[in-house]
Image (tube, helix red, strand yellow):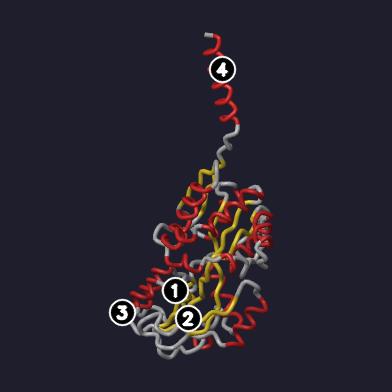
Amino acid sequence: MKKIIAIMALALGLAACGGSEKAPTTYINIGTGGTAGTYYPLGGAFAEIWNTNIDGVNATAESTGASVANVNMLQKGDIDVAIIQNDVASYAENGVELFENKVDNIRGMATLYSEPIQCITTDGSVKTIADLKGKKVAIGAIGSGVYCNAVQILAEAGITESNYKPQYLSFAEAATGLRDRQIDAAFIVAGIPTSAIVDLATQRDVKVVNLDKELADKLKAKYSYYTDYKIPGGTYSTQKDDAQTLTVQSMLVVSSKLSEDMVYNMLKTMYENTDRIKAAHKVGEFIKEDTGLQGMSITLHPGAEKYFSEKGIK
């Protein structure tokens, strides 16, 4: 009997020891975008990867108002990770454009894929950005990332609100306006091909307006987050020639409160499971370790800095 009691006590002791070694649960809320967009399915893939491969993690992706809303939620502590544009990240860290004050707890994790700036027109007289003078141009909702991009480009081209007719429209509203000939051009910042423009090209003669080299160089010199981008001919059915433009990058940002080890492991498992990311959305094919710092516009989180340093990626 004493032997049985001793064995039971040993078993209970081992169970207690095992229980004490279990990692505490770390809840990670991921801010994405609208459910019909690109950010949301990617966020779901990241959550699944981290839940499956990092002990103690309980990650959840939630639909949000995208970049600016995500920064505000991160600042408040409502989310821990977010997918946003790298230009918006720069505004947030520096307290400019869309943000009155610096966002102190935002850190870079990795850049993901390009989101080119597309100036779309159905007006055959618009060949360059300079031709937008006097035209009705959709420049995104006031306070949006698109609005900032459009205003920056137009200003460098010498076009101010006094010599064109700004229309503050969402992507869907802009596509409808082009279809119904209520506007002449629209700025859209999104991965290509953009579905709303694909649909528009079945009804109207759609063209992507070139950003000439001189204008592009001025913008790159002034704003570090812009890089060159070519939209191939045939991206839209009525666009036969290549179009030169600029692009921003989508990126993962994290709260500075996340530990170095956690962010390191999140990156490691993310890049080890890129097939899952590709299955979530076709842009997943562009999410690669060796481009994870291209267009990085803010201070890296120490966990990300450690990860990319070990990989020799700068």
State the residue position of label 1: 192
Foreground: disc 3 or disc 2:
2
Residue that extends furthest to the left in the rendered view of this protein: 203
Residue found 38% across the figure and 71% down from its top? 195
**Left or right: 229 with respect to 174?**
right
Answer with mark 3 or mark 4, whichever residue precedes in sequence: 4
State the residue position of label 4: 9
| C-beta proximity under 8 Å, tags 2 and 1 | yes
Answer with mark 2 or mark 1, whichever residue precedes in sequence: 1
Q: CA distance from mark 3 to mark 4?
A: 75 Å
Secondary structure of the residue carrying tag 2 is strand
| C-beta proximity under 8 Å, tags 1 and 3 | no
Q: How many marks?
A: 4
- 221 versus 78 height, above or below: below
Residue found 55% across the figure and 56% down from its top? 82
Answer with mark 1 or mark 4, whichever residue precedes in sequence: 4
Answer with mark 1 or mark 3, whichever residue precedes in sequence: 1
State the residue position of label 2: 231
Q: Amino acid at mark 1?
A: Ile
Q: Amino acid at mark 2?
A: Ile
| C-beta proximity under 8 Å, tags 4 and 2 | no
State the residue position of label 3: 202
Image location (x, y in percent) of residue 241: 44, 88
Q: CA distance from mark 1 to mark 4?
A: 64 Å
- Rendered image quadrant of residue 302: bottom right
Q: CA distance from mark 2 to mark 1?
A: 8 Å
Q: Residues within 10 Å of mark 1 (few under 14, many from 20)?
A: some
